[in-house]
Image: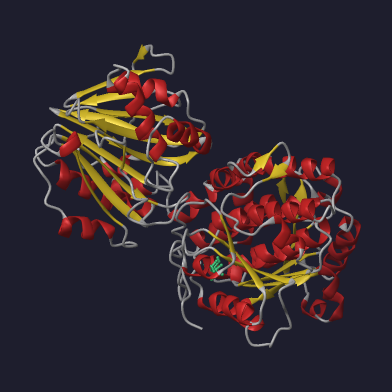
Amino acid sequence: MCGIIGFTGSDDPFGALLDGLTLLEYRGYDSAGVALVNPSESGGIWRSRAAVRAQSIPELKAAADPPAARAGIGHTRWATHGAPTEKNAHPHLDCRGEVAVVHNGIIENYRELSASLVAGGHTLSSQTDTEVVAHLVEEELAGGAGLFEAVQRCSRRLRGDFALAIVSAGEPDLIVATRQTSPLIVGRAEGLGVVASDISALLETTRELYALEDGQVAAVGPGSVEVVDRDGQPLEPTPIRVSWGVQAARREGYEDFMSKEIHEQPRALADTLIGRVHDGLTEFEELALSDEELASIERVVVIACGSSYHAGYIGAASLEQWARIPAHAEIASEFRYRSPVLDGSTLVVAISQSGETVDTYHALREARRRGGRTLVITNVVDSLMAREADGVLYTRAGPEIGVASTKCHVAQILLVQLFALHLARIRRALPPEEAARLAGAIEALPGLVEEALGKAERYEKVAEELSGVNDVFFLGRNIGYPIALEGALKLKELAYVRAEAYAAGEMKHGPISLIDRHSVAVVVATRGPLWPKLLANIEELRARGATVVAVTDEGDAETAGLVELVLEVPPTEELLTPVVAVVPLQLLAYAVARERGNDVDRPRNLAKVVTVE
Ligand code: AGP
């Protein structure tokens, strides 16, 4: 996600924009830029941009000598299309430098729009989807429309998610804003008009704020806000009742980033899906590994750490099941030093939210040194690993601020499973209709996670029963085992509870000696071919006095009848269960941690990016 800001009627729009961007930087910090409407500039728009990761705003402040102006827009970027370079930084301009645009979201049909603009004589200078908007507005203005009308017409041609703020040299006091799915706030004060991605950037300026609804277009002037619906009919915008301070606003009302990001998971999954499944077929614009290259792969090794390893474990299982290719996951810090045997027929897939984890990075380099082909799945465009690999796939979860990974973890699982379907198609390992059915089930995951989040209160009640525990087993079989691994990791890193995950079939080979009437075990018992064996494992635990919490399919009375506590989730394809079943385990760990007064965003001893071995 990115940050958008706009001011009109300000005596110092440049300063106001930079202050606003600073408050929005948590939304993305690859690059930043501002545009001021200044008729004396050639074209009428003055623009300054910088792409110095997390330092772009100070860079703008130091480098710029802004002209006098009355209105301007600004942007801080989390790259989804196009490397985080200055050329790709927003704002983007039209051919004549008379229109400037900032955007948050993903314009799904930008390629066809771009092709038609170029065919019409436009020159596009960036790799972004956003730039097409500036040129579309340019065409409407050239046809005699005013900016307000021009943006209304253009927004009807866009598909995907977008929040846009647009200025034009011809109307120096006007900002036009519109949104589809991505949030956008407009507001006013005496002689002032404001636009922003969220209220955290505006609270210190005004509390007369309005939330734009999908399809609405706002004309924001000094002291004025005029809104029309997608048919151009005027309407009264929805006022926002603001009771938050700035910090709470950054968390959009959530107590902390951890809970915000857990609840952002449906959005992270939906954004990661955009443009990647068409009529049941997968398509990856940025992959850079051709079907021919992938067809020559005979084995896949997935390398990662922590939660990314758990996602990789699920990905390897999916690759083996669907693409019928030998695949396994390894802890990156182990892979690196075990002198692995691999060659050009081995695809080494590195999964890393940050793209900077040193264990995974060096393991990736070792794989390349030994002749393996490499693919990186990461959340950070152009990260260290993304630049190192033969191919890359980006999750689009937006910045993950909480140290414990949640929305990136599920986005990684979804993306590696889409890749598994991609490879299955290339290897003709799945009947096309089965692949299409699985792709459809993957596309349904955002809704199922939303449903699971709707049960949060019930999950929290289970957590209350466990708040005093200090030693928890997590058990699962097959695809339930990496879910158990992730549930145990979350409880460790958030609640500081000793939590160990075992493959349930392994308990009888030793660990069951630990079970007694003080034991607590969380068993991932969603319905699958091995569900009856999990019931037997539950009986073994209960026979020794353990308290058992079961993650079950919704309405599974048989399993519920065997255990004390139940965490129900909506059912899905067996291999797709992890994305849904992890939600109650995240919320369980979160609730126990909060109950213990832990800092859930910055757990002790941890760092968001581990850059030491
Ligand atoms: C997950 O909750 C942890 N924060 C940690 O295990 C993390 O997944 C691991 O350090 C890998 O990070 P990466 O995805 O950025 O490589």
- Give the x, y percent position of residue 116: 48, 31
- Give the x, y percent position of residue 425: 78, 50
Picture mark count: 0
Q: Residue at x 64, y 46 (%)?
A: 458
- Give the x, y percent position of residue 233: 38, 11
From the viewer's perspective, tell me whether residue 461 is left or right of residue 424: left
From the viewer's perspective, tell me whether residue 329 is left or right of residue 68: right
**Of residues 160 and 308, the one drawn nearer to the viewer in this rendering:** 160
Q: Quadrant of residue 331?
A: bottom right
- Whether residue 468 appears in this view of the structure is no
Q: Quadrant of residue 274?
A: top right
Q: Quadrant of residue 501?
A: bottom right
Which quadrant of the picture is home to ligand 1?
Answer: bottom right
Residue 134 higher or lower than 149, as above or below = below
Residue reaching furthest to the top: 233
Residue 95 higher or lower than 18, as above or below = above
Residue 611 higher or lower than 129, as above or below = below
- Give the x, y percent position of residue 53: 34, 62
